[in-house]
Amino acid sequence: MSTHSERDILHPSDLLIQAMDRIYNYRMTTTSGGNLSLLDQEGSVWITPARIDKGGLKREDVVEIRPDGEIKGRHKPSSELPFHLQIYATRPDIKAIIHAHPVALVAFSICGKKPNTRLFPKAWETCGEVGFAPYALPGSEALGESIAREFAKGVSCVMLENHGVVVGASTFQEAFRRFETLEFTAKTILKASVLGEVHYVGEAGLSAEKKLATPLEEFIPGAACARERILRRELSDFVRRGYRQRLLISTEGSFSARVSGDSFLITPRGCDRAELDPSQLVLITEGCEEKGKRASFATRLHRAIYQRHPSVQAIVNASPVNATAFAVSDERLDTRTIPESYVFLREVEKLPITILSEDPAKVADDLSPNFPVSLITNDGAMVLGTSLLDAFDRLEVLESTAEALINSRSLGNVRVMGDAVISDLETAFHLPAR
Ligand SMILES: [Zn+2]
């Protein structure tokens, strides 16, 4: 599922197996639901088999449908082969298709709704407008026609009424990113709807990232010092761990760690966070990026924070679903829930997404080692730490606190800790006032 090179060198069967493993292991489909296919250069369609346990698919289980219609393999192809073929026939630009029944998107599907991907600039850019195909019998040509009619409009993500979702793309990696991003968007909307009205991004917010795209100057670094080598390993470990813990998705999330003074390591742009390796991290020194790499859009912002706060050693931008739900609704994330939350997170402010490109210095002023956490509207969370572990820990506390707050809604009113309790905590843990 590597994305740093879009040139597929894996055999189609291996690509399908790896993707199905990832979709199943992260609970984005059930064992019976879901099928994947890709169209190769010779015109063969490779598809997952019918009625085989998705938890243990092997390369030999994948079925090939030759351009002349001959079926090669030891199983029958997925019963949904007809709609895969109709999509390929309708849209020559599509070479990979993912179909599944992930729970958040199924919730939309059974209400006859589709998620609005203008929830996040990244989701809009990755998924675009979403189509909606009226119900038809699974496996039927009629279902294929219903879905292909939507793809013919130019969309790449289509909700299936009372069924699930289909996503298409020109590469398998792109299809996976779209699928995962759409499910994440749906999940966030569901969580945020518990909190109140959900806000979407206007044009200014959607183009905020483009303003950050101005390239940095490049430099050729000398030999890596021991600290850089250790940080490369630790930082890539934390990014992959964050992915596994669902604190970020494959397309979102910037982690950085200071090497020394005005020099830090940061995640590259557009890499797959699940498979990030130490060599992909980008070294930034005096505002210039390591030659030949493209650093995260958050680079200028992280630099402004490192310059303003010498004790900050690590910075994380991530989008865990529950905390992000607060970032897309008006509800305040009140940390006076349990002592751990208040001590680690302090007061969590919300900053507008446009501030990222317009006024990084303001973010550096608002955040500090004493007030290390902030939400960014229609984006996610931003967390500072005195070490990588410190920042990662705070991110986990933030997400747990947000999840507890959302879950508590079904039990009744939250009784936040009172002023006297807070004052005791501030004294006991030497927490300075803002
Ligand atoms: Zn299905």
Image: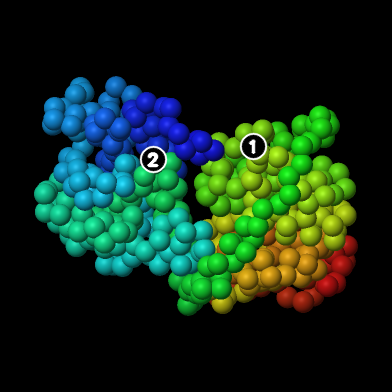
**Residue at image location 69% in from the left, 70% down from the top:** 358
**Residue at image location 20% in from the left, 46% down from the top:** 89
> From the viewer's perspective, is 428 left or right of 80?
right
**Residue at image location 20% in from the left, 54% down from the top:** 148
Q: Quadrant of residue 370?
A: bottom right
The extreme left residue here reads 141
Residue 411 vs 2, above or below: the answer is below
Residue 213: x %, y % from top left = 62, 57
- The disc labelled 2 sits on which kind of residue? Phe
Residue 283: x %, y % from top left = 74, 42
Asked if the residue at tag 2 contacts the one at tag 1, i.e. Cβ–Cβ closer than 8 Å, the answer is no
Residue 296: x %, y % from top left = 64, 51
Write down the residue under mark 1: 280
Write down the residue under mark 2: 172
Could you tell me if residue 315 is visible in this image?
yes
Separation of disc 1 and disc 2 at Cα? 21 Å
